[in-house]
Image: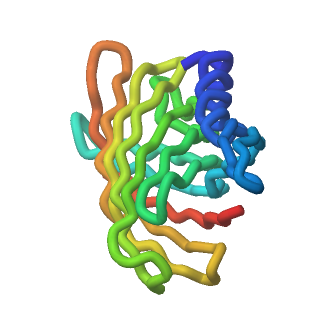
Amino acid sequence: MTPARAAWTCCLLLSVAAPRLVSAQSAGTATAAVETVRLPVRLAVQTEAAFGVHPGDFYNQLVGVRVDLQFSSHVSIGAYGAYANLKGKDGRAHDFLAYAQVEYMALAPGSFMRIPLRFASGYLPMNGPVVRAATGVAFALSPKVDLITELLAPTIWVTGDQAVLSMNLALELAVRF
């Protein structure tokens, strides 16, 4: 995904929160009013370790940020960007990973503990596509701050002509606005 495509994706996601025109009743006559409809936004900072399991062992480290739009207390969609420190052919390689993520947060809103179920698809410019699914445990530190772990996160990295599999662990801090 090019930086321009990532920027357009973010703009598209944020356009959902734009104002919309609604009709209102005032003293028996219909008038037009502009109501701002704002979806809750969540900003997350994440670190992730990827342990290669097939076709050989490797270790990748990601550090990134994600912006999510929360459509309900259970469903959100987000755009993620991360610095990727990857195993390369001749030592470590550096890249930028961008992906879109869909999340379903199981269990009751307001609970101290919830279960995130996530799916993401993205692209590493110097390697290729990346697909991941993840689940873990989310802990509410306050009404607006969560500490989220991803304990099971199989990830497929397409590098050149082969796909490699890693099992990832992640830790993130998320704040809702």
- Could you tell me which quadrant the C terminus lies in? bottom right
Image position, residue 40 (x, y; %): 63, 57
Residue furthest toward the front?
28
Image position, residue 41 (x, y; %): 65, 54
Relative side of 118 to 61, left or right: left
The quarter of the displayed image where residue 121 is located = top left
Question: In the rendered picture of this protein, how many numbered marks are placed on residues?
Answer: 0
Image position, residue 156 (x, y; %): 31, 35
Tell me if residue 137 comes above or below residue 66 in the rendering. Answer: below
In front of the other: 95 or 3: 3
The quarter of the displayed image where residue 89 is located = top left
Relative side of 51 to 97, left or right: left
Residue furthest toward the bottom?
112
Residue at 48 percent across and 59 percent down: it is 72
Residue at 69 percent across and 51 percent down: it is 25
The quarter of the displayed image where residue 94 is located = top right
Tell me if residue 124 comes above or below residue 13 in the rendering. Answer: above
Residue at 41 percent across and 52 percent down: it is 103
Tell me if residue 22 comes above or below residue 27 in the rendering. Answer: above
Relative side of 18 to 49, left or right: right
Residue at 61 percent across and 66 percent down: it is 173
In front of the other: 120 or 25: 25
- Could you tell me which quadrant the N terminus lies in? top right
Looking at the picture, the colour scheme in use is rainbow
